[in-house]
Amino acid sequence: MDLNKPADPPPPPPVPYEGGEGCLTVAVRVPVRIVVLVLVVPVRMLWDLLALCGRAVHTALLRPLGNALTWFFDQVVAPVARALGVAVLWLGKALLLWPLMALWRYVVVPVVKYGLVVPVSWNYRRVLTPLGHGLVWTLGRLAAGIAWLARTLGAGGRWLAVGAGRVLGVLVVVPLVALWRYVVVPVVRYGLVVPVSWIYRRVLTPLGHGLAWAARGLGAGAVWTVRTAVAGLVALLRVLLVVPAGWLWRRVVVPVGREIGAALQVGWRVAGFLSRAVGRALKWLAWQLAGRPAAWFYRAVCVPVGHGVRDAVWRPARRAAAEAGRAVRAALAGARATVRQARRDAWRALVGGPRAAEPVPGPPLQARNLVGTQQPQTVPGVAAGTETSLPERA
């Protein structure tokens, strides 16, 4: 028994159900595709022609024009605009900023400082501050006098106030308290508050509860009626409108739309194939009618003629021009040398030849030693001798 037997592969997932195509789909497909193909082919050919013209215009006109405009902007407009910006900025500074700064610095600030701030601060320090201090001192002294007078009259005032209060209490407060306690409170309590409370508890409260119960019942009935009517209306609309519209959408609109979309895709692809075929045919025809004769004419006529002109005319003319140039350069060099020699001879005749070098005698009892050094040296106490270089001695 094989214990290493591989496990069975899992079963494949179930294939989703796809409904078959109905007779309406099959009946609509072919006519729709024929009509769409007939309508789409001219549109696709026109589209391809417009796309070709657009690419040609972009390559031959728009791109060079854009490059030219870019160069013109970078080389002309941008420097001119930069220069104008600098000029306008400088002019704005010269006409607005600098005059305003000068006006602020030399007119407004001095006028405000010396015409307003300095007088106001001097008036505050020299006039208002001493006046305020004097008023505070005066009011303090006056308050102290009033307090002393009140303290002096305080004892007599308290005795008079106590007597007047007792008299008022006996004559006014006691009758008013008795009137409030034994007349006003009983009348208001038993003649107004108790009847009103009884009417509220025994009459108004049960009546309000009954009215509220009746209102809730009427509201619940009205709500049930409205809900029932709305549910019935929704069911009626669903049966009469939604279900037929859904069936029409699923069974008619969706298949027809799907077929029209598929027909448009197929027609667009077929029209593309036809358009490319027509384009290749036109390209072949143009090559046969114009390109091939032009290429043959270029190879058979223009190339030999060009080579003949190059070998018989251009190269000899270039060699002759080179020889003439060399001759002209030699003649000009000889003329320059002659003019230079004549100028040198004329200068020698007017001024004279170059002056010959004269020997300079050395100081006495000193001799110049050239042996073993590159520069002449003088040795004191040595007799002067002949000056000969090392090569001459050798």
Image (cartoon, rainbow, N blue to C red):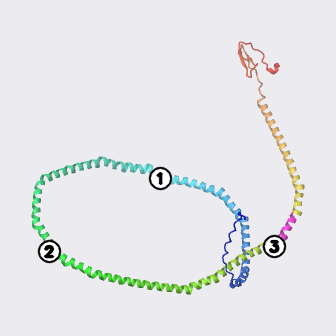
Secondary structure category for the residue under label 3: helix
Q: Which circle's residue, 1 or 3, is located before the other in the chain?
A: 1
In the foreground, 329 or 200:
200
Residue at left offset 32%, top offset 81%: 209
State whether residue 347 is above or below residue 227: above
What residue does disc 3 label? 281
Instruction: From the top left corner, tell me how far across and down residue 340 is, in percent.
Output: 80, 37
The amino acid type, in three-letter code, at marker 1 is Leu
Quarter the N terminus occupies = bottom right
Residue at label 2?
Answer: 183
Q: Secondary structure at mark 2?
A: helix
Classified by dominant secondary structure, the portion drawn in magenta counts as helix
Q: Is residue 343 visible?
A: yes
Q: Position of residue 156 (x, y in %)?
A: 10, 55
Report the amino acid beneath label 3. Answer: Ala
Q: Magenta segment range?
A: 287-298
Residue 216 in magenta stretch: no
Whether residue 202 is situated above or below residue 149 in the rendered picture: below
1 or 3: mark nearer the eye:
3
> Alpha-carbon distance for marks 3 and 2?
126 Å
Residue under label 1: 100
Name which quarter of the figure residue 294 lies in.
Answer: bottom right
